[in-house]
């Protein structure tokens, strides 16, 4: 028997698909825990922390956003 998703989950998934791109990164073993700790210490989510780091580097290198 196939389980159907809640309407709210379907809405969120559709919204995210329409408004966001997904980016998967792979890091060496142990680095994920370090990134999680750094993000938590900064009061941010991992996504927010990594996204901010990427934007800062892009600004530093004068790359287009």
Image: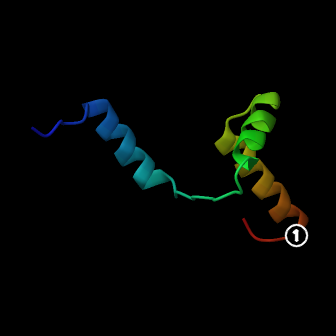
Q: Residue 3, relative to residue 31: is it above or below?
A: above
Q: How many marks?
A: 1
> Who is closer to the viewer here, 29 or 10?
29
Label 1: state its secondary structure: loop
Q: Quadrant of the C terminus?
A: bottom right
Rendering coords of residue 45 (x, y %) = 67, 35
Rendered image coloring scheme = rainbow
Q: Residue furthest left?
A: 1
Rendering coords of residue 27 (x, y %) = 69, 57
| Residue 62 occupies quadrant | bottom right
Residue at (41%, 53%) from the top-left corner? 17
| Residue 46 occupies quadrant | top right
Q: Is residue 11 left or right of residue 37?
A: left
Q: Quadrant of the N terminus?
A: top left
Q: Is residue 10 left or right of residue 58?
A: left
Residue at (38%, 39%) from the top-left corner? 12
Q: Residue furthest right?
A: 60
Q: Residue furthest front?
A: 29
Q: Residue 48, relative to residue 53: is it above or below?
A: above
Residue at (40%, 45%) from the top-left corner? 15
Rendering coords of residue 30 (x, y %) = 73, 47
- Mark 1 Cα shell of 10 Å, populated few (<14), some (14-19), many (≥20): few
Q: Residue 17, relative to residue 62: is it above or below?
A: above
Q: Which residue is mark 1?
A: 61
Residue at (88%, 70%) from the top-left corner? 61
């Amino acid at each position: 028997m196939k389980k159907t998703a809640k309407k709210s989950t379907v809405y969120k998934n559709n919204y995210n698909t329409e408004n966001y791109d997904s980016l998967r990164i792979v890091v060496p073993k142990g680095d994920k825990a370090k990134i999680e700790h750094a993000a938590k210490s900064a009061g941010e989510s991992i996504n927010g922390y990594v996204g901010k780091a990427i934007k800062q580097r892009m600004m530093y290198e004068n790359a287009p956003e």
